Amino acid sequence: MVDIVTIGSATMDVFVECDDASVVSVRKKNHSTDFMSYPYGAKLEITDFDTQVGGGGVNTAVNFANLGFSTSAIFKVGDDIYSKGLFDFFKTKNVDLSATIQDKNDTTGFSIILTSFEGDRTVLAHRGANAHIKKSEINFDIIKNAKLLYIAPLNGESNRQLDDLVKFAKENDTLVCFNAGTTGIKKGFNYLRKILALANVVVMNKEEASMATGIYLRQDTKDVKYSHETIHPDLKEMFKKLKVSDYQVIVITDGGRGAYAFNGKEYFYCPCFDGPVVSTLGAGDAFASTFCASLSRYELDIAKSLVAASINSGGVVSVFGATQGLLTFKEIEERIAQHPNFKATIISE
């Protein structure tokens, strides 16, 4: 029996940094989009390069184990040089891989991460075996005996298992933390609502929440200025649409602007923990999984859990690699003590 089971993707990540990359912003009245660009047809020098193991299933499993929970990971890989590197990586991570799925006829997931001078990134992802998890391959007995099932984004055909996963967990009193991915969101809100209804904690970034609900955050104009002292009315509507069960906590992250949470009664806001930003890859996984772990450690204290999640994700973005900067609870609590003014607040409507 383990405390936590994670299911999600496993990839070999190649980080590429190039000083010739530009960030181009395109803004409309209702939303804005940033693009990373390179000179078309050019041959450019790489400034920095690194290879790490990543993926939502891997990143969150490593984090839970690092935080002191007995952890099992379910993910699917091929039988190739990348899967060998992945298994070598886990030799020192104290994560149970007995439920790992390996298919010699498939390929292990692979990603190229293009990092900007601001520390943000664009990911070119080959899903490989990550997109081909079948129900018959999932070890449901491990889930049955766990306290928490953490579902990282599932892509392609793997997303078809969401219904069975959350229903099985609910029937066996296993708590569910659901980090929605675009594959499930694109199926429409009526489909997503069934999954949301069975999840105890739901985490999305602002773009995913907007896609899921069909609600876009209006930007300030010369005539209308939205107060930063209260929750944005469009964000409030997102929360209300996403919260379909009384017992849920909904979290919406907003990149470098921080994160919000809603428990049905109060809205919470936590800024990002201040520090260097080298690469944002893995920050979302660290935040979501640390928030879930902290709810357990701090007896459902949402504000304190947001603070712990922000501090841990801040450790991740300070270095290359999605798991290299992860902190233990002892280290997180030391930073909380060192920064007494860093707090999450309840914000008004």
Image (cartoon, rainbow, N blue to C red):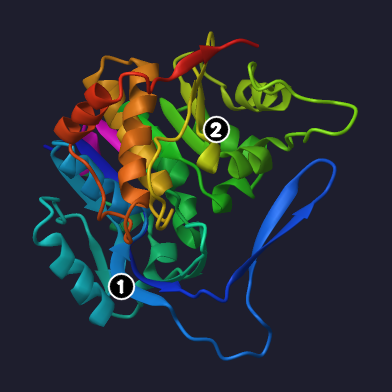
Q: Quadrant of the C terminus?
A: top right
Q: Is residue 101 above or below residue 263?
A: below
Res 88 seen here: yes
Q: Answer with mark 1 or mark 2, whichever residue precedes in sequence.
A: 1
User: Which disc, if any, is residue 194?
Assistant: 2
Q: Amino acid at mark 1?
A: Thr
Say few, some or many: other residues with alpha carbon within 10 Å of mark 1 (under 14 / 14 to 19 / 20 or more): some
Asked whether residue 170 is drawn in magenta, I would say no
State the residue at coordinates (49%, 60%): 157
Q: Residue at x 14, y 31 (%)?
A: 330
Seen from the viewer's position, the closer of residues 60 and 162 is: 60
Looking at the image, residue 73 sits to the left or right of residue 233; the answer is: left
Q: Is residue 17 left or right of residue 107?
A: right
Using the image as rendered, state which of residue 22 and residue 79 is in the foreground: 22
- Tell me where the magenta segment starts and ends, as one range: 142-149
Q: Is residue 143 magenta?
A: yes
Q: Are marks 1 and 2 in contact (CB under 8 Å)?
A: no
Question: Quick check: 302 left or right of 232?
Answer: left
Give the percent coordinates (x, y) of residue 80: 26, 81
The Cα atoms of the two marked residues, 1 and 2, are separated by 38 Å
Helix or strand or loop: what does disc 2 sit on? helix
Q: Quadrant of residue 150?
A: top left
The quarter of the displayed image where residue 87 is located = bottom left
Q: Position of residue 149 (x, y in %)?
A: 30, 37
